Structures are given as structure tokens and as C-alpha cells.
Amino acid sequence: MKMFRIKGGIHPDERKDLAAGKAIETVPLPSLLRIPLQQHIGAPAVTVVEKGDEVKKGQLLASARGPVSAAIHAPTSGRISAIGRFVAPHPSGLPGQTITMRPDGKDEWGELPAPIDDPFSVGPDIIAERVAASGIVGMGGATFPSAVKLGLRNRNKLETLVINAAECEPYLTCDDRMMRERSEAVIDGIRILRHALGVERAIIAIEGNKPEALAALKAVCSANQFKDVLIARVPTRYPMGSEKHLVQTLTGKETPARALTADIGVVVHNVATCYAIREAVRFGRPLISRVVTVSGGAMARTGNFEVPIGTPISHLIDHCGGFNKEPDRLLLGGPMMGQPISSTRTSVVKGSNGVLALGPDETPARQTMPCIRCASCVSACPCGLTPFEMAGHIRKEELDAAVKIGLLDCIACGSCAWVCPASIPLVQYFNYAKGKLTAQQRAKHKQEETKRLTQFREERMERQKKAKQEAMARMKAEREAKKKADAEKKRAKQETIGA
Amino acid sequence: MNALVGGPHAHSGNSISRTMVLVLVALMPATLFGFYEFGWPAVFLFLVTVAAAIAAESFSLALAGKPQKPFLLDGSAVVTGWIIAMTLPPWAPWWIGVVGSFIAIVLAKHAFGGLGQNVFNPAMIARTVLLISFPIEMTQFLTPQPMFTGSSPGFLEGLEITFAGHTAFDAVSSASLLGAIKTQLGLGVPVNEVVGGSLSLTAMALGIVPGSMGETSAVAILLGGILLLATRTITWHAPVAMIVTMAVLAGLFQAIDPGRYPGPAIHLVSGTFLFAAFFIATDYVTAPATGMGKLIFGAGVAALTFIIRTWASYPEGIGFAILLMNAAVPLIDHYVRPRIYGRTRSGEPIRYEET
């Protein structure tokens, strides 16, 4: 297949060997599951159970609220022990609404939606409905509700489904293992998705550093003579997993700024999402677990694990024998875009693809030096930005200037900071500026709203005042007219008398 | 464990000091060849200049209230001092090196805010100020006296030359090629009669001609340049733009009047041209950020060098050319920027066929 070159990108140390050889294992159920209601982009789900309820595996715990939300289901059978605020798997460590459940150990399935035995014979809407009901979100980490993406069919003319199996973040191997071990199911899911979108072809994009996964998927396709699924070996270059860059590599088409890939006819789904969709469609199973890579030099044991959603990270770490040395950083996700874990009491959620414990040698402490304008960041940026200049503006609080040269086009991939010889935390500058801009916009919006209301009030007062004045004037005029009329009458009377 | 650190949590491992060390390694061939060609005085002048650069850096950091250790260890002061030494006449007295280093570090670098903040290349400022202020000391070039040959001064004699201004040795002082051409042209001698003998092209390429300490041997400079390119310390843009532009301009004018205008080969291998192409025009701080910007920068340096060498009074035009183009860098960077993903060059979202 012809590939198109994209600009920039880097080659971080892959470190996939730490976990790539480890088959997916099941993690024993923890004694408590903590299931956040916010596991996706969009509004948090709304609970439909109450404290004390007995629930079965797969039962709906919270339903989607709003257009970009996703339902949440019970990962096992047990009792709801609490519903309340608990520290969320977010670097801020701020609490979020969380359902706590105590598994009963029976792991009994509840009633599930009927399996769709032949997904290729039902309409796309039925599949989209099932995906929505199953609470499936993009499992590459972006956690965008998958059903919404299936609905793009009604908005754009779609041509191609791209399966993002690049897995370009170092250390992570969960997609790799899934493709190796569950290749039949993965291909099936991709074909279901292709059918649901009504597109001609599906392209699986895998980075060249996963030859086993590539071979496994190829074997399935050729054995079944699937002509609707192409497998593309894309160059191993970070951030190949960036949706727009992946699409450009495969199709040569560049997604316009502020647009979706769907606008150029391509929809992208993560490979693990395809597996989840297949489970939901063919077996009625909602998304209640996911494969997580546990890795890093500070982990006693690395591997890939099928983990129930809501499993505390501490449980997963304990299952792997804890740390073999004091970790320098504990991350949820990969080292490039992953977030520091604020507390190991937080849980594995739908978007968690990795739990990494990095030793000091893997994240050496680095002293930040002044920028020497070496422009390595300019060459590395896959978005054509000038990161050092943006950071310079932000340092001087010139946010508008930073926006003008592309701050909002930054995808926060971290390539710039990775190459920076001065170790300037460029991504942190950009995140700070983006956060500040959002806050400013909110404040501005509020101010404008206040101004509008004040103005409205003033106008109303003005109107009332005017009306009052007019009424007074009218009354005065009436009074005078009456006086005049009276005088007139009087005179007429006198004249009559005089005559 | 710090939970508040932000991503990315991995790093290439590249650092400013690593970059500077690579530059120093790349400077080695030309430096060692310079030592060999010009003997002990060259070694002493080099040591004095580098030491003065480090002292100037330390002094400036103290004045600015900045920490000494990280900035002294970044290697940038050593690189500056080293490059200044490369551009000096090898038997220049010690104070030339000291004054040069102080001008470069204190005035051209720290007065602008220190590492990464300077607009002009510090070494080029130093060289240009020295050239204007001390024209005699700065143009005392000599015919190479390879080390350990009879005419080369010994260790003690070397000390005397550098520190006592003793020049009574058998040094054959002579003009550089560009100076010679300039003078001879003024006397009505055509170019092709000036070039030849000790000033032959082969001699210039090998570096056995009068000149500054580290810029005479094209071969040694190219070795360093290739190393810098291979390690991706520099990009090809500025050197290639400089060389191509100079070759084209020189070729064009030579075709017009071969008697008056030296050809491309002479322009390329003489003076500081090649050295500047690989070691000065590629200075991160004072060159444009984008590939396109670097091409413009390199072409501008070459064109200005050609103009100054050909029509102005200073044959060594490259210093001025670099400084003039340094001044143009903010302008170049403002107008020449990469195209943002998904946008046209003017910043509008690219158009797509409505699907």
C-alpha cells in the first residue's frame, strides 16, 4: 500500500519489549470496585441504581446524559456500597462522582440484550443503538463515545474506515497483544464496524514494530478471503497514532483545521474499540473490562491484563508484585501523553491503556535551560508549529500572539518537549495557556452576559420612565383641555346671560 | 515521587552541553591542523582565548546573578572562545584573544540577556570589532611553519611570540589570498596571475596557505561539517545555500570578466567562507528557525560576502555579512514559518471537497 509522508515526528525509545511478550492475563476481582461516572468526553453519566442495590454483571449502573455521553455498566455482580465523590483518575486529584461496588464473588451475568447473530443483515442504526447502549467509548485514550462516531454516517459521505492500531506510545502493548491473541474477533469487529458505517473498505494501520500482530491479522484475512479489510504497515514514528496524521499517512489527505477526519470521508476507530463493539453486537456484552499494559522499569512484574473497569490501580499493582524500586513517576497511559496518577486508589477506566511505573533512569531529572533557538522543536512538530516561539509568547503572557501562531492547533503530543535540548517543559506551557484561554473566554462570556442584562435593565427603566412621563404629560394635557373647556363653557354661559 | 510533573515523561536525552561537545569534536580536525601548521604560538593563543571566554562567562554570570555551574557546564562559552581562536591570525598577541573573548561574551552575549538571547553571533562580533580596532594585528598572516620543522618556533619561543609580542623569528608575514588579490587588482594585475604557487587552489584546499588559525584547510573544515550533519547537530540548509549562492555569483561574474573577478573555487576555499558555512551560519541562536529561513539566511550571507569582498574595502567580508544577516533573522522568522497542519500558508483552514 502506498504511504504518504507526514512532517515531523520523533522516535522515542520504544521499550515495548518489557510487556510485548506477555499474554493477556485475567486479574482477580478486587474487594471493591470504584466506577467513576465520568469515563468519557462529554457529560457524566447519571446513576440509575441506589446504594444497597444488588446488581448483576453487565447491568446498567448509569445512563448517558446528553449527546456526547456514555452509559456505564456493572463489571461484575455485587452490591452498590456507596455513591458519592471520590478522587478521580485525573492528575488534578480532584474528586468526581463515583459508584463504589462490592463484588459478591459470583460474577453472575444479568440479563443482556439479545445477541445479534448476523450483524451484517441488520441495519446500521441497530448496531449504533447497541454500541450506545453498551457504553463503548474510544479506547485509545480519547474516550469519545463510539456511537456518536457511528452517527457521522448521517452527516458526511464516508469512504474509508481506518482502524488505529498504530499504538505509537512507548511501553504500551495492550493493542498489540489483543491483535495477536484475538485476531479473529478483532477482524470480525472491524467488519461489523465497516458494515455499520456503510463504507467500502477498512484499513488497519499498524506500526512496523508489531510484526506478530500484523501476521496474525493477515492470516485471518487471507484464510477467510476478506477483501474488505486491508492491513497497512505504517512507519514506526511517534505520533503516528494521531488520528489526522494517520489518515494522512494512509490516504494522503490532510484534514482541514477545525474539522473532523469525517469531513474528508474517513472515520477512525481504535482497534480495542472494534473488539468491544463486536462483544456488544454479537453477545450483548457491554464494555465492562479492558486490556491494560502494566509496565515500566519500577514494576516488579510487567504484563498485559484484562481488567474490570473500576479496579483500583493499587490492586493491579499489587497483583503484579508491587514495585521493585521506588518509582520516579507513576502514569496512567504512555510516557508521551499519559497523566501522572494522583493516587493509586483511583481506578482503571475505559480509556486506561497503561499503568506505568517509571524508574529514575527512565525519566532522568533534567535541568531546564534557556532556549537556544535550535529549532529541534520546529522540526519535530507534526503540526507545523514553532513551539519555542509559542512558549516565548506564553512566558510573556502574550496569549493572543501564541494563538496567532497556532497554539490552538497544537495536539499536545509532546514531540517538541521530547527533543528539546534545553529541557523546556513546552507542553506544560501550552496546557497552561490553553487552560487560561478557556478561563478567559468563560469570564468574557460571563461579563458579556452581565453587560447584556444590565443594558436590558437600563433600557427597561428608560422605557418605564418615558412611559411615566408620557402618561403625566397626557394627564396634564387632559387637565388643561378640561380647564379650557370649562372656561369656554363658562364664557358661553355668561354670553348667553349677557344676551 | 512527584505527581505534579507534566508530560511528556520521556526525553531524547539531548542537551545543550551534548550539542556543544559535538561542535567541539567537529572543530577538532581544523584545530589540530591549525596547531600543526602554525606551531606553539597558535596553541598558546588558543588556550588564552578559550580561558578568557570562560572567565568572561563566569564574570558575566556573576554580574547577572545567575548560577555559575549550569551555565559554565553548558559549553557555550568554550565554543565561542574556541571559534574566536579559529578566526584569529595564529601568531596574534595574547591580548587580542582576551579582548576578543570579552567582547564576544560580555557585550555580544550577556548584554543581550545571556545564552540564547543574543541577536548577533558573538564570535563574529568579536572578530569584526578586532578587525576594525586592531587592523595591523588582525591581518598579520603568515606562511605556515609546520610544527617540529626547523622554521617553527619552539615551546619557549612560542610563549615569547604570544605573550611578549616577539616577532623576530623567521615568520614570513604575508597577506591572505583575498587581500593579495585585492592589492594586486589595484595594481592592475589580473586574478589568474595572483593565484598559483603558494596560493594555488590545491594549497588552499589542503590549508597550507596564510590565514587564520582554523580556517585555512577546506578539507579539515569539511570533515567537521560532515560530522555535524551526520549527527544532525546542524541541517544542510545554511551551508548548502551559502556554497551554492557563492558559486553561482562568483561564476557569473567570472564569466563576465575573468581578469577582474576570481572564480567560484577561490571564493569558496579562501578566507573564513567554508568555516562560516558550517560553524557560524549554523549557530542556532543567531540563525532562522525554519529550513526555508536558513536557506534565505545562507544565500544572504553568501551574496553579502561576495559584494563586500568584491567591491568594498575589506577583503574579509564574511564577518560583516553574517552580522547583517543576523540582524535580518527576526524578520525572516516572522515571515517564513512552517505551514500549520490543516491550514494554508496564510493561516486559513484548507479547503476540502464537500463530502
Image (cartoon, coloured by chain):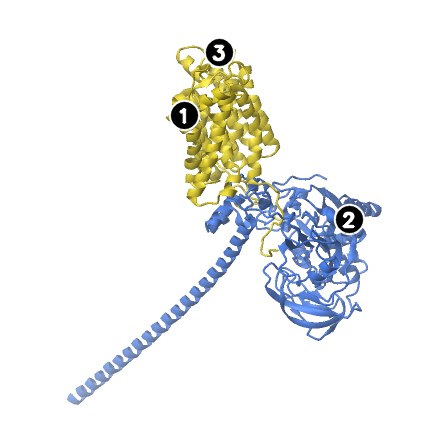
Chain colours: A blue, B yellow
Marks 1,2: beta carbons within 8 A: no
Residue A140 seen from this side:
no
In front here: A28 or A111? A28
Task: Tell me, for residue A390, which label it has, or none.
Answer: none
In space, the residues marked 3 and 1 are separated at their CA atoms by 28 Å
Q: Is residue B301 above or below residue B182?
A: below
Residue at the limit of the structure toward the front, as seen here: B156
* Residue at the outermost right position: A223
For mark 2, does the 10 Å Cα neighbourhood hold few (<14), some (14 to 19), or many (20 or more) residues? some
Q: Chain of mark 2?
A: A
- Where residue B192 is drawn, which disc sits there? 3
**Disc 1 residue crowd, few under 14, some 14–19, many 20+, Cα 10 Å:** some
The secondary structure type at the circle numbered 3 is: helix
Q: Mark 1 — residue?
A: B131
Residue A344 to residue A81: above or below = above
The N terminus of chain A sits in image quarter? top right
Which kind of residue does numbered mark 3 sit on?
A: Asn
Q: Are marks 3 and 1 on the same chain?
A: yes
Which residue is rendered at x = 41% and y = 10% of the image? B188
Split into 4 quadrants, where in the image is the C terminus of chain A? bottom left
Separation (CA) of disc 3 from disc 2:
71 Å
Residue A449 position, x and y percent, is 46, 64
Foreground disc of the pair 3, 1:
1
Callout 2 secondary element: loop
Q: Nearer the viewer, mark 1 or mark 2?
A: 1
Give the residue pinned by disc 2: A21
Chain on which label 1 sits: B
Closest to the camera, between mark 3 and mark 2, is 2
The lab-note entry on whether marks 3 and 2 share a chain reads no
Which sits earlier in the primary sequence, circle 3 or circle 1?
1
Q: Position of residue B252 (x, y in %)?
A: 49, 19
Q: Is residue B19 above or below residue B87?
A: below
